[in-house]
Image: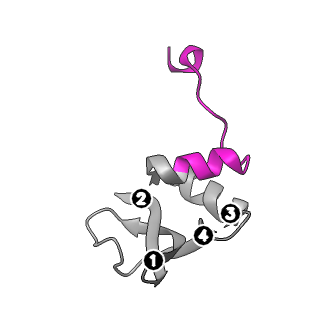
Amino acid sequence: MVKLRLTRMGAKKAPFYRIVAIDSRKARDGQYIDQIGYYNPVSEPKQIVIDAEKAKAWLAKGAQPTETVLGLLIKEGIVEKKTKEDKQ
């Protein structure tokens, strides 16, 4: 199963994350299939850069985003936030 998740980059105490499509069995920083964007929580303001076309393509192929990546996708307007009415 393919997941959309963060892989940590950057120096000690200065994290920087890539948003990647990766096999769910691989290690957090293991070899990924495709890089979709990046997230820098340290900078002010926080930087979020996501290639919307790649993200939508991976989601269409059945890739499952982690909670954090899903939050970033919603924040960028790439994915609609699910409400309780949508789940029923």
Residue located 71% across and 61% down the image: 53
Which of pointers 2 and 4 indicates the residue nearer the eye? 4
Q: Quadrant of the N terminus?
A: bottom left
Q: Which residue is mark 2?
A: 3
Asked whether the beta carbons under mark 4 and mark 3 sit within 8 Å of each other, the answer is yes
Callout 4: helix, strand or loop?
loop
Q: Callout 1, which amino acid?
A: Lys
83 sits to left or right of 30: right
Q: Give x and y (percent) for residue 28.
A: 33, 71
Discs 2/1, front: 1
Residue 83 is inside the magenta segment: yes
Name the residue that disc number 4 marks. 42
Q: Amino acid at mark 4?
A: Val
Q: Position of residue 40 (x, y in %)?
A: 61, 70
Q: Residue at x 63, y 50 (%)?
A: 73
Which residue in the structure is indicated by mark 1?
13
Give residue 82's position: percent from left, percent from top.
Answer: 58, 29
Label 1 environment density (alpha carbons within 10 Å; few <14, some 14–19, many ≥20): few
Q: CA distance from mark 3 to mark 1?
A: 16 Å
